[in-house]
Image (cartoon, rainbow, N blue to C red):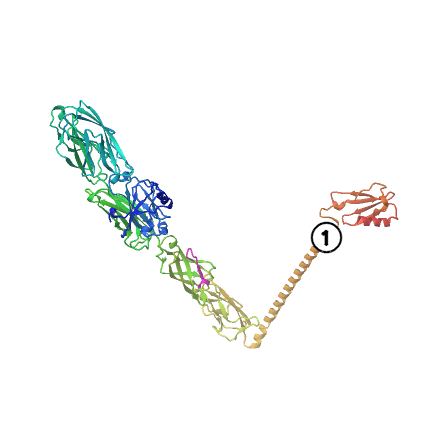
């Protein structure tokens, strides 16, 4: 859709403005806006606004036009991207509207170029989206036509024929269209009229044509006013004063050989390069035929870029830039000495040279991405711009190395960096992605940027044990809590996902939970024995240990562990025969007629240990007659080693020791009573004292225990008695002495003191005297009467005594005194 086909929409005016219109007030506030929503896969919206709109003016409701909700703009961190250009339009995310951010001067932005538009993009994230926005800036009549000089002086020969033309300076108006330069007027018009010629570039060639012969004698000097006017509202104009001096005898004007000259020059041409050459001839003779050249361009900067020599060569004075101006139009004027002139035009086409590298701008970039991100995940969005034209401005982008990313073009000049295969943090945890963009110029120019990307870990690896199974051994009778060995698993993930915890897999062994046998440290994987093991009860057992990582959800692996219990020589041999009892004595009878090697009896023993710890050997430790009996070292058989004689005693006692083969070895002993006799009564008489000895020992033990109990009882009773005496004495002392150890103070009455009124407690006169010492237990208290003296003393035992001095009949009074003191 072309911009000129966009419909104009007149916005509704507020009620106050409509009232002003009804009253006929000429001031009217109109705001024209054009909104066109281009429906395409790229999402493009175009607006049209006038230049010089105040800051904050609404350009358009971009949220409504794009079909977006306000919360999408806010959550997606919507922003305006203008590249290297200045940001004139900003986004109000709260209102979903585009508003004017900076003053917009169409002439400063585009000059005479039309249409004038601002192109920018709106970028949203999560997910990344890009919308292209075009805002056309329409012209307002804010610039008046101006002339380069305020005055122009022309010398004209009086012989100039009617119809002679004089080129005047053109005015420049920065505005365009109806607001641009429209017409000229010349006053007064007595001798000259104004003639305008339209040119191919839309400007007008201004000529002043002589319509009445000049007569220097009548009027040598003339003053004319040239006015340039635009078509805007209100009308604006500019003027230049023309001063004409009438000369004699130059009646032929210079004439250019061509009305238009054309030249081509590359943009990298150096200063001083000759652009082209113009030529004009004047048929007059002498000084009237001498022609000089001038460049008459005023406000477009041509006179600063070029100058013309006296011979008509146009020379480059500045630097050209194809991206700024693709051609220049130079107005050249040829003037003779008589003031007659002719004009021509030189069109200089600037050719492009590949002098600009592509400019890469990062629009949006993710600093990290999950390793399980699907193919096609957008990592970054960049814009690439090459100001050059044609093939010099055609850009191709590529990426470095063999990496799981690719770059694709999303629209003209915009690219997306996306994943094109699966990512694995364990293989590569970060990438430096270099994007290189090259143009198709000769030689090609390129630019590059480097994007740093971190791969975020995902819990996709389960812990792996170092071994497929574990086996360890532990010696029985171990202490609980003993460290047996450790299992170890590693996780290829990172941080929390790689943190491994060890857990004992619950199972039962002989009906008992495995946790009653062993435990595993969750952090280190060290397996500890919970109980002391007994080889005779359990020889080995198996269980499983699980390794769980810290991911969400966690991943688990397990391993089989076997623990073998090693035997220890912790059991002494046990005697099975002969049976040892305390109730009666058992004797083996050997007849006196027994031959050598006679089997008396056999000691039978077992050891519950295993292996060499259970190998038993038998030895004869003590015997009444060692020359009579021997014990088989391996089988425990007791046999005679000589012929029994009548001299051998009847009662024979053998002590046999049974030892195992452990380190250290353990042993057990057994007493074997042997009776050498031919009949049972003889045996009975010899062994009857066994019971007597046993009863004697039992009685002795009883009396010893009884004596110890009696002594202990007497000691306890004595201790209680001593404590009771101590407590009694302490309480008696407290009856007479306070906590500070002082006696009460008894006042001293002077001699012959009497109670007034006879109402006092004491019916007689007494004198008291208190004697105190540093030891309060030895203080004395004295009191006296007029004709006698008695002393109350308190000895160290706390007893009160009264000693009489003279009168024996003071007993009752002494008793009264004793009560008063008490």
Residue 333 visible here: yes
Judged left or right of residue 559, residue 737 is: right
Span highlighted in magenta in the image: 514-526
Q: Is residue 269 visible?
A: no
Q: Is residue 482 magenta?
A: no
Is 525 magenta? The answer is yes
Q: Front-most of 12 and 564?
A: 12
Closer to us: 59 or 535: 59
Where's residue 283, x and y in %? 11, 27
Q: Nearer the viewer, residue 36 or 387?
A: 36
Q: Position of residue 692 (x, y in %)?
A: 61, 70
Q: Residue at x 74, y 48 (%)?
A: 737
> How many numbered marks have been drawn onto this rendered protein structure?
1
Q: Is residue 157 above or below residue 694?
A: above
Q: Is residue 475 left or right of residue 419?
A: right
Most distant residue in the front direction: 23
Q: Quadrant of residue 610?
A: bottom left
Q: Quadrant of residue 542?
A: bottom left
- Which type of secondary structure does the marked residue at label 1 adopt? helix
User: According to the image, label 1 marks what residue?
Assistant: 731
Is 630 on the left or on the right of 282, as rendered? Answer: right
């Amino acid at each position: 859709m072309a911009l000129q086909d966009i419909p104009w929409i007149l916005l509704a005016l507020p009620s106050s403005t409509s009232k002003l219109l009804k009253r006929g007030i000429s001031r009217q506030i109109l705001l024209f806006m054009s909104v066109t929503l281009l429906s395409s896969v790229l999402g493009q919206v175009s607006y049209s606004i006038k230049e010089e709109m105040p800051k904050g003016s609404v350009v358009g409701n971009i949220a409504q036009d794009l079909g977006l909700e306000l919360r999408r703009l806010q959550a997606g961190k919507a922003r305006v991207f203008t590249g290297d250009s200045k940001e004139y339009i900003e986004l109000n995310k709260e209102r979903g509207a585009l508003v004017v951010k900076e003053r917009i001067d169409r002439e400063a932005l585009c000059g005479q170029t039309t249409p004038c538009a601002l192109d920018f993009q709106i970028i949203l994230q999560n997910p990344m989206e890009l919308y292209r926005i075009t805002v056309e800036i329409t012209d307002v009549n804010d610039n008046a036509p101006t002339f380069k000089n305020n005055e122009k002086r022309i010398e004209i020969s009086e012989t100039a024929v009617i119809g002679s033309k004089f080129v005047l300076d053109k005015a420049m108006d920065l505005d365009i269209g109806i607001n641009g330069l429209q017409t000229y007027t010349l006053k007064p018009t007595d001798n000259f009229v104004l003639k305008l010629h339209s040119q191919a570039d839309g400007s007008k060639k201004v000529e002043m044509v002589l319509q009445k012969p000049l007569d220097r004698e009548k009027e040598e000097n003339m003053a004319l006013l040239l006015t340039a006017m635009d078509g805007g509202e209100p009308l604006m104009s500019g003027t230049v004063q023309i001063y004409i001096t009438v000369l004699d005898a130059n009646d032929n004007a210079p004439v250019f050989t061509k009305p238009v000259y054309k030249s081509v020059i590359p943009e990298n041409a150096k200063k001083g390069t000759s652009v082209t050459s113009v030529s004009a001839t004047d048929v007059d003779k002498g000084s009237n035929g001498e022609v000089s050249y001038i460049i008459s361009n005023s406000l477009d900067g041509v006179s600063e870029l070029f100058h013309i020599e006296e011979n008509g060569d146009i020379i480059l004075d500045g630097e050209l830039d194809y991206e700024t101006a693709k051609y220049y139009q130079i107005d050249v004027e040829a003037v003779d000495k008589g003031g007659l002139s002719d004009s021509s035009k030189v069109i200089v086409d600037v050719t492009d040279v590949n002098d600009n590298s592509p400019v890469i701008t990062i629009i949006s970039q993710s600093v990290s991405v999950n390793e399980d991100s699907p193919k096609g995940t957008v990592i970054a969005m960049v814009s690439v711009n090459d100001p050059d034209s044609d093939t010099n401005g055609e850009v191709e982008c590529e990426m470095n190395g063999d990496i799981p990313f690719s770059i694709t073009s999303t629209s003209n000049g915009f690219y997306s960096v996306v994943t094109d295969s699966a990512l694995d943090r364990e293989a590569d945890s970060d990438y430096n992605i270099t994007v290189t963009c090259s143009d198709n110029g000769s030689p090609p120019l390129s630019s590059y940027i480097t994007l740093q990307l971190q791969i975020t870990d995902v819990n996709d690896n389960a812990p792996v044990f170092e071994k497929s199974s574990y086996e360890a051994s532990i010696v029985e009778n171990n202490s609980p809590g003993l460290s047996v060995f450790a299992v170890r698993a590693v996780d290829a993930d990172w941080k929390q996902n790689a943190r491994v915890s060890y857990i004992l897999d619950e199972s039962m062994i002989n009906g008992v939970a495995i946790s009653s046998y062993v435990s595993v440290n969750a952090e280190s994987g060290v397996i500890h024995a919970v109980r002391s093991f007994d080889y005779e009860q359990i020889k080995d057992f198996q269980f499983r240990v699980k390794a769980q990582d810290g991911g969400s959800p966690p991943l688990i692996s397990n391993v089989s562990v076997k623990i073998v219990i090693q035997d220890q020589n912790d059991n002494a041999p046990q005697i099975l025969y002969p049976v040892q009892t305390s109730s009666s004595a058992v004797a083996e009878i050997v007849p006196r007629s027994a031959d050598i090697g006679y089997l008396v009896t056999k000691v039978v023993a077992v050891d519950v240990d295993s292996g060499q710890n259970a190998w038993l050997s038998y030895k004869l430790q003590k015997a009444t007659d060692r020359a009579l009996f021997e014990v088989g070292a391996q089988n425990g058989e007791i046999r005679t080693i000589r012929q029994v004689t009548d001299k051998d005693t009847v009662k024979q006692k053998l002590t046999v020791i049974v030892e195992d083969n452990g380190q250290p070895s353990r042993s057990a002993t057994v007493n074997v009573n042997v009776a050498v006799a031919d009949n049972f009564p003889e045996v009975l008489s010899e062994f009857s004292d066994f019971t007597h000895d046993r009863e004697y020992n039992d009685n002795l033990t009883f009396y010893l225990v009884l004596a110890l109990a009696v002594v202990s009882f007497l000691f306890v009773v004595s201790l209680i008695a001593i404590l009771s005496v101590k407590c009694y004495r302490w309480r008696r002392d407290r009856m007479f002495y306070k906590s500070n150890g002082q006696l009460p103070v008894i006042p001293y009455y002077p001699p012959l003191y009497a109670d007034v009124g006879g109402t006092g407690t004491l019916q007689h006169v007494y004198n008291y005297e208190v004697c105190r010492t540093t030891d309060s237990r030895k203080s004395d208290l004295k009191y006296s009467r007029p004709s006698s003296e008695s002393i109350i003393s308190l000895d160290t035992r706390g007893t009160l005594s009264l000693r009489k001095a003279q009168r024996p009949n003071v007993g009752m009074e002494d008793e009264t005194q004793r009560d008063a003191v008490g």
